[in-house]
Image (cartoon, rainbow, N blue to C red):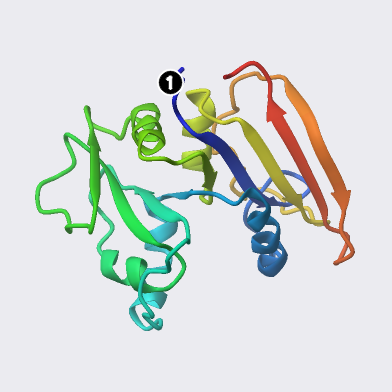
Amino acid sequence: MVAERPYVVVHVAVSLDGATGGFEPDVGRFYELANAFDEDVTLVGADTILTQEEALADAPRPGPTDGAPLLAVVDSRGRVSAWEALRDCGHWSDVVALRAAETPEGAATAPRELATEGERVDLGVALAALGREGAHTVRVDSGGALNGALLGRRLVDEVSLLVHPVIAGNGSAAWHGPHPPRPATLEPIASERLDAGGLVWLRYRIAGDR
């Protein structure tokens, strides 16, 4: 455990069977609820960004927004290229690429880069570095691969699930990735039935990990 790391929240829109796909999430309500965390850093995996790069190419670029969170992208393999568009799209104050010592040469240069030792980004070291820069809260806005990696390293403090009244069925990716997460005791923080379409918001703190 890295003592000085920020408080990490995994906030996910899921089906009743724990999937992140196979249904239409209420994106507006999802991000409305995300505002409750008042994060200093939004942590995203490269796969999530890559699905948005085509749209980013034609998106308005008002520039960085003062007071907005920092966007940190886990990009061990150097696949992300739309760094300027991400920085200038108006959602974040700045962007930082989280890279590894063995990230391939020739990866697109980001406005800011933070490298850790090894073949893949050491998430604990990266979070601690963000904490030393003043980050208190990190909200993870990503798919199951990054969520699962953070859970596996015991780097998650809170799980926030916006549960939709649908069953996605076979073939849909689980919010915690392809492998079962490590056993953990969860302490309920809050549960709320929302007015819109039967949505339920569940929040749990992972006990004993800090």
Quadrant of the rendering where the C terminus is positioned: top right
Q: Residue 193's x, y, as percent?
A: 89, 53
Q: Is residue 160 left or right of residue 121?
A: right
Q: Position of residue 70 (x, y in %)?
A: 41, 54
Judge by depth and name the residue closer to the eye, 10 or 114. Answer: 114
* Residue occupying the point 60% across, 52% down: 38
Residue in the foreground of this view, choosing between 25 and 1: 1
Give coordinates of residue 95: x percent, y percent: 33, 57
Q: Nearer the viewer, residue 13 or 137?
A: 137
For the point 23% across and 48% down, the residue is 113
Q: Quadrant of residue 32?
A: bottom right
Identified by mark 1, the residue type is Val
Residue to which mark 1 is pinned:
2
User: Which residue of the protein is positioned furthest toward the left in this rendering?
Assistant: 105
Q: Residues within 10 Å of mark 1 (few under 14, many from 20)?
A: few
Residue at (29%, 50%) from the top-left corner? 97
- Whether residue 1 is situated above or below residue 11 in the rendered picture: above
Judge whether 197 appears above or below 147 on screen.
Answer: below
Q: In the rendered view, does 80 fall on the left or right side of 93?
A: left
